[in-house]
């Protein structure tokens, strides 16, 4: 447990130290930038952090008994900047990733890519391997889709992020794409997490459909413990009793994760809402909540999309949204392009 005290008196420090030692904990303190940091070592499970928070001079109490260590702010206080080619997540810029849910053909993907680049997107998305609820739904173009992704990425000049679903494909895919996406359904596929950890590729780790923030950070911990700290977290909505929307976009997760972890967090309002009509409002809300980026589905002809058409923006709607986001970002002293 760490107790941060703001300009405390000697007596206030003594009261905190005495209380800790009475509980059987070993207490130490140090002064840093006008603050006093008291560390308590030992089994703090019986300690009531709230009691310390109420003591005079105490600013806040941090527990380092979190199950996640490397991804925690206790381990690294400054924000981690994850760089994908020349695009940075976690700094002043708020990059927008856009593209169709799935790669369907060269023409469909090229048209999507040209449209999203023109509107200001910095990374291109598109699934070649699609984890679908039904085995009878479109499963993606697989290797052919990957070839289209690479060709269009080269032609249009945007880096690509695409989902990897199979641990055996990680090494092969890491050589071909700029960022690997772990989808919501695979967030707790630990074999897959350990494989992406071995690569040096940036990873977009989506939150599981029913995962708590702690479980999600533990999934990130697997990747970081395996040697890869290039992790961008992505809130994409969770399952709740609400059925008007496809998922419930948990924007609470943005400030909570930013407090708990040094990793950047972006938001996916497309899967988070399930309808193109609500993508814009929730994208703007995500920026207000402090998101470090967005991932948005855009299709040249959403009505004909092989997957996720109802939540895909048309290029014109995306372009309009990007203009609104740019204005909003500057009001927040940040930038989208
Ligand atoms: C996707 O990005 O198209 C996708 C399948 O997302 P999720 O894993 O969040 O459902
Ligand atoms: Mn999708």
Image (cartoon, helix red, strand yellow):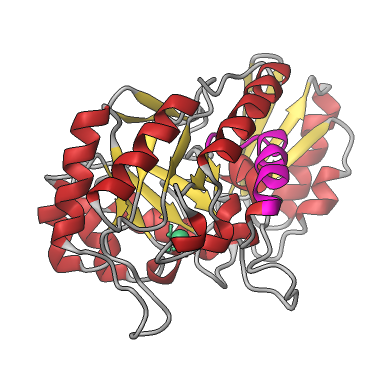
Which quadrant of the render holds ligand 1? bottom left
Quadrant for residue 283, please give it. top right
On the picture, is 291 further left or further right than 309? Answer: right
Position above or below: 97 against 128: above
The rendered magenta stretch, by its main secondary structure, is classed as helix
Classify residue 176 as left or right of residue 263. left
Q: Is residue 101 visible?
A: yes
Residue 2 in sight from this viewpoint: no
Front one among 68 and 161: 161
Which region is colored magenta? 277-293
x, y percent for residue 179 = 29, 43
Q: Residue at x 35, y 72 (%)?
A: 131
- Report the residue at 26% width, 55% height from top: 105
Camera-side residue of 50 and 110? 110
Is 287 included in the stretch rendered in magenta?
yes
Q: Is residue 38 left or right of residue 310?
A: right
Does residue 315 sit above or below 89 in this rendering? below
Residues 128 and 291: in front is 128
């Amino acid at each position: 447990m760490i107790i941060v005290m703001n300009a405390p008196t000697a007596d206030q420090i003594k009261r905190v130290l005495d209380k800790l030692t009475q509980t059987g904990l070993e207490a130490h303190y140090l002064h840093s930038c006008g603050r006093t940091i008291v560390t308590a070592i030992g089994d703090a499970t019986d300690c009531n952090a709230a009691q310390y928070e109420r003591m005079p001079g105490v600013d806040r109490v941090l527990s380092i008994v979190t199950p996640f260590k490397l991804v925690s702010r206790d381990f690294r206080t400054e924000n981690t900047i994850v760089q994908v080619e020349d695009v940075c997540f976690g700094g002043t810029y708020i990059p927008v990733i856009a593209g169709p849910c799935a790669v369907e053909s060269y023409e469909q993907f090229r048209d999507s890519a040209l449209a999203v680049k023109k509107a200001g997107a910095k990374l291109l998305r598109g699934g070649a391997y699609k984890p679908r609820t039904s085995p009878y739904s479109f499963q993606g173009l697989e290797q052919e889709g990957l070839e289209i992704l690479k060709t269009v990425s080269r032609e249009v000049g945007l880096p690509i992020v695409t989902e990897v679903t199979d641990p055996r494909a990680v090494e092969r895919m890491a050589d071909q794409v700029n960022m690997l996406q772990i989808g919501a359904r695979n967030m707790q596929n630990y074999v897959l997490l350990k494989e992406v950890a071995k690569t040096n590729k940036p990873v977009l780790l989506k939150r599981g459909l029913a995962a708590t923030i702690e479980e999600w950070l533990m999934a990130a911990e697997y990747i970081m413990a395996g040697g890869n700290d290039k992790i961008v977290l992505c809130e994409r909505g969770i399952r709740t009793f609400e059925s008007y929307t496809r998922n419930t976009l948990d924007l609470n997760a943005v400030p909570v994760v930013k407090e708990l972890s040094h990793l950047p967090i972006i938001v996916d309002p497309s899967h988070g809402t399930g309808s193109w009509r609500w993508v814009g409002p929730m994208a703007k809300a995500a920026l207000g909540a402090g998101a470090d980026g967005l991932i948005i589905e855009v299709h040249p002809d959403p009505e004909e999309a092989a997957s996720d058409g109802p939540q895909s923006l048309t290029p014109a709607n995306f372009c309009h949204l990007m203009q609104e986001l740019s204005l909003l970002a500057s009001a927040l002293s940040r930038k989208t392009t």
